[in-house]
Amino acid sequence: MAWGQKKSGGRKEPQFGLAASLSELRLGPQDRVASGDDESKKKPSAKRKASDSGDDAARERKPRGKGSKRKSKARARGGLGRLVYWGVVLGLWAVIAAVGIVIWVGAHLPPIQSLEIPKRPPTIQIVGFDGSVLATRGEMAGANVSLKDLPPHLPKAFIAIEDRRFYSHYGVDPVGIARAAVTNLLHRGVSQGGSTLTQQLAKNLFLTQERTFMRKLQEVELALWLERKHSKSEILELYLNRVYFGSGAYGVEAAAQRYFGKAAKNVTIAEAAMLAGLVKSPSRLAPNRNPEGAEKRAQTVLTAMADANFITEAQAKASIGQPSYNVKPAGAGTVNYVADWIGEVLDDLIGQIDQNIVVETSIDPKLQSVAEASIIDELAAKSVKFNVSQGALVAMTPDGAVRAMVGGRNYAESQYNRAVTAKRQPGSAFKPFVYLTAIEAGLTPETIRQDAPLDVKGWKPENYTHEYFGSVTLTQALAMSLNTVAVRLGLEVGARNVVRTAHRLGISSKLEANASIALGTSEVSLNELVGAYAPFANGGRGATPHVVTKIRTGDGKVLYVRPADQLGQVIDPRHVAMMNTMMQETLLSGTARKAEIPGWTAAGKTGTSQDFRDAWFIGYTANLVTGVWLGNDDNSPTKKATGGGLPVEVWTRFMRSAHQGVPMASLPNARQGGFLTSLIQSATQVSTPAASSAQAPVAQAPVPLAPISPGGAYRPPPPTRATSPSARPEAAAGLDGWLVDRLFGR
């Protein structure tokens, strides 16, 4: 290689001087300084010199290659060192941040003392006036049960489906979390949870149900705390006694009682599987709401129990093929309408509920059962014929204490309370407030008014029969439910005064002060309408419908006692006597002749709204005031159901049963058997028989805002003076006129 270089590069001339010697300086041993003798002896030839020059070049290149490798290795070692350094730094900061988060999360946890004994949700027990339990509201928490008292398959069912590694982790299961993450990733959604039983217990006991990262961190900390504080058996027992199972049931004991009607210690494998399956989604899978979903989930639990070798394959197949659990219907009784109403007013009575309470009510369980049967049976027999799908009933004492309330035909199907919440047009059932206003203005039951066509700024109210009877007394007009007379009275006394009267007696809904108010065109609830009739039954005192009489804690501490009404006298007793006399005739000879309670004096008023959409009857004795409504939730017309038909039949059935064994009493200032009827009976003893026209069927006069067919109408002859002094008139054909003639000779 040196020779090649010489040929191509030419002869290399020697250079002299300090710069030249320094440029050729090398660090090798061959570059040491030699003596002059050595230089003369070892003077190389031209070829040797060229060869040495080539060797020197090779030697020059070699040390330079080794230095580059050393530098690259040094740089690599420096990069690795920097990586380790910054890794350590970041790790330290991560540890500091983690410690800070733990401290911050821990600072926002509930106080440790509140974690020692978790507080159960409050239970509201509702009892009747006889002390019997009617319903349970709020959270139904069963008694604590010991783990050793439960059948082994019950806790194993929960472990199999919720936390199979329960006895292997320390509150948090990384394996379970990883498995859940992979499963959810594969299913592209949340199909499996990674929370352990301990984490679920921590959440249920101490935290809210919100889905936040903060709550999850708190859950982890509390789970670790629980594992350190309690044994596995204690945690499992606490879990089983606190977990929510839907339908207001907390704990396995309450759930077993709610769904199976038995103690938790007696549940079968299939029942245990169903209970364990509810934890995933208690509201959605509750068997009283979703029996198919609950059964399907129970089958999943049974499969998991078999996979975990908690039960045999044969046991799993037997339970899946023939499920032994039989869901106990809960909340189907109509008394639950009462319980819901109580729940709505509790906050106003005692504020926030933070302990178990007992609510004593005025409900009579026997009357509640009778009321429920009266509504349900009547609708079952005639709902199709009259196109009536729903009904409601309210019965209260004359002082407003509700004894029975039915808000619909089936609470399980519809929780809408048609007795309290629904507001409908009362029709002619509102007329007593018009007539009372007229009586208070100086008119009497014998006052004569004209039943004739009427035009009120283009509105022409008509009677149910489209017939007019000329001069009639107010008693006749109310008993026959003549619309034109009611409108005339309303115009005479003023719509605003009618509204004031209704509000004074207890109507709380907004009423429109116009001419049609006389025919009940403003909507009211059944409960308030019945309450507004109560003063007629108690002598004129104001009464507020109520159901709660006392509230106390479980240990007997009284939280509330209902005070006496301070409304005082809202109707003059003389006017009460006149109104009772008039409304008695509705039952004796008017639109409610089917309403009869043997031995009792009763009064009331029927009502039918426009197009037969609502049928009402409010009737009362000195013992009870009862109202009935029948109609449809969608406000669709019925098939000519009137207040004098189905509602009267329901009312009569209920009131006859309610008055059995009750000492008889007369209405305030009313004569036994009715004021007019008693005089008629005495008059028949001295009168001679006379031919009389047969009475036609009675039907209620609805609000005539649209033409209504007169089928089945009440058709009395026009009220006229009797042609023979010894002739007995028909009851509906001028009783009052006949009475005035007999008493005053006019």
Image: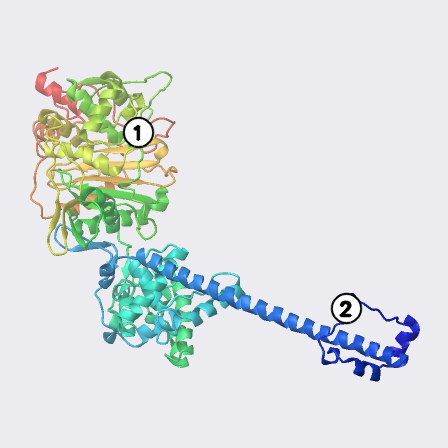
Circle number at residue 23:
2
Q: What element carries label 2?
A: helix
Few, some or many C-alpha atoms within 10 Å of disc 2 (few <14, some 14-19, many ≥20)?
A: few
Depth check, mark 1 against mark 2: the one in front is 2
Instruction: Please state which of residues 7 and 239 is positioned toward the viewer in this rendering.
Output: 7
Q: Residue at x 74, y 77 (%)?
A: 31
Can you tell which quarter of the image residue 83 is in? bottom right
Check the image and report above or below for 429 versus 317.
above
**Residue nearest the viewer, comparing 495 with 352:** 352
**Relative image position of residue 237 (x, y in whole percent):** 27, 70
Give the structural element (helix, strand or loop) at label 1: loop
Please state if 549 lies on the left or on the right of 80 as rendered.
left
Query: Where on the picture, by quarter, is residue 175?
Result: bottom left
Q: Does the residue at mark 1 contact the one at mark 2 (Cβ under 8 Å)?
A: no
| Quadrant in which the N terminus appears | bottom right
Give amino acid for label 1.
Ser
> Residue 664: x and y, percent?
7, 41
Residue 494, position as x, y percentages in the image: 24, 18
- The CA distance from mark 1 to mark 2 is 120 Å
Whether residue 250 sits left or right of residue 94 in the image: it is: left
Give the residue type at disc 2. Answer: Ser
Asked whether, in this view, residue 303 is left or right of residue 506, the answer is right
Q: Earlier in the sequence, mark 1 or mark 2?
A: 2
Using the image, determine if residue 407 lies above or below residue 145: above
Residue position for label 1: 522
